[in-house]
Amino acid sequence: MVELTAYPLYLIDDDYYWEKKGEFSSSLDNLLDDPNGLWGTQSSSYQGKYDRIPEDMCVNYEESLYLIKPKSLKIIVRIEGQEFDNAKRKIRAEFEYNDITYIFPVTDPVIERKFLSGENGNFTLSTENIYLCVSVGLPYNGYCYKFLASIIEWNEKK
């Protein structure tokens, strides 16, 4: 078992309010991460593709968050878990990054609200102004699971 001390944890203090200091007005391209891959392609869950890492390999990675520009992006809205008597509508993102196709669960609340209020299906999005914030979580049942934390549509301010 991997010790939690191998993973730095950060807590946000609820006793302090955040204060807006300004707006980002540059290109997000300047902030992009450039990993060769997204924490490897060792393992996939039942509904995902390359969406988890065996727990003993999690310590091989220092980064847990990347801002990337996908080559393609499709939102998948479907009922999952019926075969396990745990049916629930879920949202996943299928995207291509560095010639590898991934399928990650989506945890972006704005995207969840938008797509869960509509029909099931596959929805292809233009990636012209789209950036993805992808992340990997702490160990759970022998794996560290990857997820799409945020889909950012960015139109540069002129």
Image: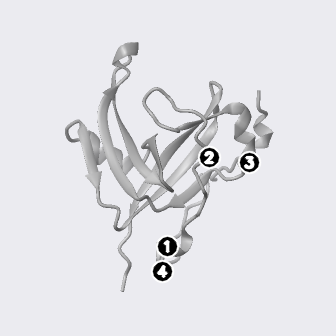
What's the coloring here? one colour
Q: Secondary structure at mark 4?
A: loop
Mark 2 and mark 4: span between their CA atoms?
28 Å
Compared with 103, 35 (above or below) is below
User: Residue under circle 4?
Assistant: 26
The earlier-in-sequence mark between 1 and 2 is 1
Residue 118 lies, in percent from the top left, at: 20, 41
Nearer-the-camera pick, 110 or 72: 72
Q: Residue at x 68, y 50 (%)?
A: 10
Q: Amino acid at mark 1?
A: Asp
Q: Quadrant of residue 72?
A: bottom left
Nearer-the-camera pick, 28 or 49: 49
In this picture, residue 25 sits left or right of residue 43: left
The earlier-in-sequence mark between 2 and 4 is 4
Residue 1 lies, in percent from the top left, at: 77, 27
In this picture, residue 99 sits left or right of residue 127: right
Mark 2 and mark 3: span between their CA atoms?
17 Å
Mark in front: 2 vs 3: 2
User: Residue under circle 3?
Assistant: 8
Which quadrant is the C terminus positioned in? bottom left
Q: Residue at x 41, y 59 (%)?
A: 71
Q: Secondary structure at mark 2?
A: loop
Q: Amino acid at mark 4?
A: Ser
User: Residue under circle 1?
Assistant: 29
Q: Residue at x 46, y 41 (%)?
A: 104
Q: Amino acid at mark 2?
A: Trp
User: Residue under circle 2?
Assistant: 39
Q: Are marks 1 and 2 in contact (CB under 8 Å)?
A: no
